[in-house]
Structure formats: structure tokens, C-alpha cells
């Protein structure tokens, strides 16, 4: 069984390629490396002792996609390729709508022409409207996104749902990720953000390794147990295994279904800092700062549908996530540039 992985050199993509190879799938990657390093794929091959096929190129390049589908028998596509930085999407909406929507349009057209009608899409908890009660179910209200990045995820869900509606042979799994953190336990692959990290865990690890002075905690006056924001963090290896489960699902079903990939448990910013310090024995100086515009107080998943339908459940603990994030960062202090 062969899987085409768009954006496979990135953070979640590289971990998923590893799990796909371990599960016996053939893997073909297309990535333009705009936010990744090809060393991730070299290391995936070293870790698994298996090879994958890599095409360096843009998913919006229809001619290249046609070649890929002609050269490889592909059963299913996992579509990670996209831009993911929320503040950058506010500053550069054209780049985000162009990349995140046109990748999907060009890709699905090439798939339709090649007769490949199974796709798994990297959606996000950001598609849920802010006024929902927790935990978020797949049936909770979506839309009212607060930034162009969120809208691209929402719109892509609409596009893929429309395709599955128009042609009943299509099988679409919309995977709504909560907050992926951590790294493969080897410490050979992990998250390698360019510039100043926006997300909490890469910021914590860069403070711990001495690349940043201190963490700013964005507000301690939320209506949460310790006043700091609460999120559903999940280990990237659990998330990667969720994609292997989704591959099995799309092979056996048609139609379009959304699935939450989260643990169902929320932790606060201070829970994260305290667990990281306790597990790894390294200091993480922090200061309480103002709230970040656009943040919600609490966000966590109801993961029941994924457990029942995909047979998938996150297994790794917060301590595992903190240990593996630090293992990766401490062995690769400047990421793949080391
Ligand atoms: P990432 O930036 O590490 O990986 C994305 C990959 O796609 C990169 O390797 C990049 O070079 C590639 N890419 C981007 N545009 C491309 C294009 N036009 N053609 C070819 N390759 C292209 O990000 P990630 O954290 O691994 O996220 C993967 C997907 O999951 C993204 O779609 C992201 O929006 C989504 N997602 C991520 C998170 C998160 O917290 N990391 C949460 C929810 C959803
Ligand atoms: C961010 C994105 C969201 C995306 C999600 C997935 C924004 C506004 N939202 O959300 O669209 O789907 O990542 O990864 O960027 N925090 C600090 N200090 C920091 C960084 C974060 O206190 O330096 C806090 C935040 O206020 C939040 C928590 O840590 O309470 C997690 O933040 P982050 O990792 O950015 O994730 P999300 O806020 O869930």
C-alpha cells in the first residue's frame, strides 16, 4: 500500500512518514522545503532502515503531481503541506489563501484525474467557533475563525466535503489536531521552527537550551484553575499513529468524516512549565505578560469518535511529551542545522 505524503518533510509529516514505513506502507513525499529540512527524511530512513521516495517541489505544480501519480501506484494521500503561522497569516493573507487553498485544489484535481480518491487532511481545532462548550465534539459549531490561517482550514474542509458529495467514490478524513508537541523518542526528528516560535512548547525548549532569555506567559487572569490558558497537548508520535489509523479508515469507507485528534485532557501553561522543569531538571524562567489577542481560555477535545471509529487513542503522558521535546532540543540545539 502506497501513501503520498504532501509536506512530509515537516514536523508532523516526518513523524507520520516514520510510522507509515514502520507499518509496512510505501511512502512517497512531495515537499518544497519552504518550512523544513530534507535531513528530517534522511533521519526517518536511518531510523526505520527503510527508504522512501522524495520529490522536491510545490503541491501547486499540477504537472509535477501528474508525473508523481504516473510514476507511482498511489492508494491514498495525506495532505500536510501548508503554511501554519497564525500571526503571519494575518500579515500575509494572500500567501496563506494561495498556498493552503490552491495546494488542495491542484492536488484533488490531480487525484481525480489519476483515479486516486482517498485523502486525509490536516485540519485543526482552530475550525471550532470560540463560543462552544468544552469538550469540543466533531458536531460542535465550526466557523467564525479569527484569522486567515483558521479560515483556510475551514474552507479546505468545505472543499473536501463538497468533493466527497459530488463523487461518492471519494473518501475524506478531516483530522482536527489539537496541540501536537514532543518528538520521536530517538531525539533524531522533531519540531524545528524558523525564527521566534509562536507556540508554547518550542518556546519553552528554546528557553531551556539558552536560545531565549525567558518565557512570557500570555495572561494569568483567565477563568481556569491557575489563571493561565488550558490546551489539549498531544504527543506527535500519537498523532502520527492517528494517521496510520486514518489510512485504514479511508481504505474501508467512502464519504467525508471529521475526527478530533486530542487526548481529551487540558493542561495549563503553568502545568506545562512545571512538568517540563520537573521531568527534565532544567530551569525555565518565565514572566507573566498580557493576554495574546485571539487566545481562548480553554480548548480541549472529546476524542470518543476517534476511539470508536478509528480505533485510535493517544497513549503518551504529559511527562513523555516534555521529556521527548527536551531530548530532541538538547540533542539538536539549533534544530536540523546542528
Ligand atoms: P510544517 O511547517 O513543519 O510542515 C508543513 C510542510 O509543508 C513543510 O515541510 C513545508 O515545507 C511544506 N509545504 C508548505 N507549503 C508547501 C507547498 N505549497 N508545496 C509543498 N510543500 C509545502 O508544519 P506541521 O506542524 O508539520 O503541520 C503540518 C500540517 O498540520 C499543516 O497543514 C498545519 O497547518 C497542520 N496543523 C498543524 C498544527 C501544529 O500545531 N503543528 C496544528 C493543527 C494543524
Ligand atoms: C495556536 C494557534 C492555533 C493553532 C494551534 C495549533 C494562535 C493564536 N493560535 O493555538 O490557531 O491551531 O496553535 O498548534 O497562534 N503561550 C504562552 N506563551 C508563549 C506561547 C504560548 O503563554 O510564548 C500560551 C498561549 O496563550 C496558550 C498556550 O500557551 O494558552 C498554548 O499556545 P500555543 O502553543 O500557541 O497554541 P494555541 O494557543 O492553542
Image: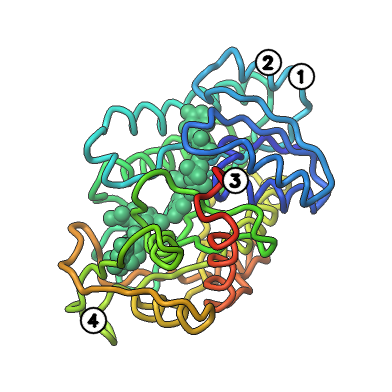
Disc 4 element: loop
Which tag, 4 or 3, sits closer to the chain's start?
3
Neighbourhood count class around disc 4 (C-alpha, 10 Å): few under 14, some 14–19, many 20 upward: some
Q: For residue 185, which quarter of the picture?
A: bottom right
> In the rendering, which numbered label is found on residue 67?
2
> In the rendering, which numbered label is found on residue 13?
3
Cα separation, mark 3 vs mark 1, equals: 21 Å
Numbered label tally:
4
Query: Could you say where residue 7 lies in the image, as x and y percent from the top left?
Result: 56, 37
Report if residue 297 is visible in the image: yes
Query: Could you say where residue 138 lies in the image, as x and y percent from the top left?
Result: 45, 61
Disc 2 element: helix
Q: For residue 4, which quarter of the picture?
A: top right
Cα separation, mark 4 vs mark 3, equals: 34 Å
Q: 223 left or right of 79? A: left
Depth check: 233 or 46 in front?
46
Q: 150 left or right of 245? A: left
Cα separation, mark 4 vs mark 2, equals: 53 Å
338 to 296, vertically: above or below: above
Cα separation, mark 1 vs mark 2, equals: 6 Å
Depth check: 96 or 311 in front?
96
Which residue position holds label 4?
Answer: 227
Cα separation, mark 2 vs mark 3, equals: 21 Å
Which residue position holds label 1?
Answer: 71
> In the rendering, which numbered label is found on residue 146?
none
* Pointers 1 and 2 in contact (C-beta within 8 Å): yes
Amino acid at each position: 500500500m502506497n501513501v503520498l505524503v504532501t509536506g512530509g518533510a515537516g514536523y508532523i509529516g516526518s513523524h507520520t512518514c516514520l510510522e507509515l514505513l514502520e507499518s509496512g506502507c510505501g511512502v512517497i513525499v512531495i515537499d518544497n522545503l519552504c518550512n523544513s529540512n530534507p535531513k528530517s527524511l534522511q533521519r526517518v530512513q536511518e531510523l526505520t532502515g527503510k527508504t522512501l521516495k522524495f520529490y522536491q517541489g510545490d503541491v501547486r505544480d499540477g504537472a509535477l503531481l501528474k508525473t508523481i501519480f504516473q510514476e507511482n501506484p498511489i492508494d491514498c494521500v495525506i495532505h500536510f503541506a501548508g503554511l501554519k503561522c497564525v500571526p503571519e497569516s494575518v500579515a500575509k493573507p494572500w500567501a496563506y489563501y494561495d498556498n493552503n487553498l490552491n495546494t488542495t485544489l491542484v492536488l484533488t484535481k490531480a487525484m481525480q484525474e489519476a483515479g486516486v480518491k482517498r485523502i486525509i487532511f490536516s485540519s485543526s481545532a482552530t475550525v471550532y467557533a470560540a463560543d462552544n462548550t468544552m469538550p469540543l465534539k466533531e458536531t460542535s459549531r465550526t466557523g467564525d475563525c479569527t484569522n486567515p490561517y483558521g479560515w483556510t482550514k475551514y474552507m479546505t474542509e468545505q472543499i473536501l466535503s463538497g468533493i466527497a458529495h459530488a463523487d461518492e467514490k471519494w473518501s475524506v478524513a478531516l483530522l482536527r489536531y489539537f496541540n501536537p508537541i514532543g518528538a520521536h523518542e530517538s531525539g533524531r526528528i522533531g519540531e524545528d521552527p524558523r525564527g521566534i516560535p509562536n507556540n508554547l512548547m518550542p518556546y519553552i525548549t528554546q528557553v531551556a537550551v539558552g536560545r531565549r532569555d525567558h518565557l512570557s506567559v500570555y495572561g494569568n487572569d483567565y477563568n481556569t484553575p491557575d489563571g493561565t490558558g488550558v490546551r489539549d497537548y498531544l504527543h506527535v508520535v500519537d498523532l502520527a499513529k492517528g494517521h496510520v489509523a486514518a489510512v485504514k479508515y479511508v481504505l474501508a469507507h467512502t464519504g467525508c468524516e471529521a475526527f478530533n485528534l486530542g487526548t481529551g485532557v487540558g493542561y495549563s501553561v503553568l502545568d506545562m512549565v512545571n512538568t517540563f522543569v520537573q521531568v527534565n531538571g532544567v530551569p525555565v524562567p518565565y514572566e507573566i505578560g498580557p493576554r495574546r489577542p485571539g487566545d481562548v481560555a480553554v480548548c480541549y477535545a472529546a476524542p470518543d469518535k476517534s476511539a470508536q471509529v478509528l480505533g485510535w487513542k493517544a497513549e503518551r503522558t504529559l511527562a513523555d511529551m516534555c521529556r521527548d521535546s527536551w531530548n530532541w532540543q538538547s540533542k539538536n540545539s539549533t534544530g536540523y542545522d546542528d
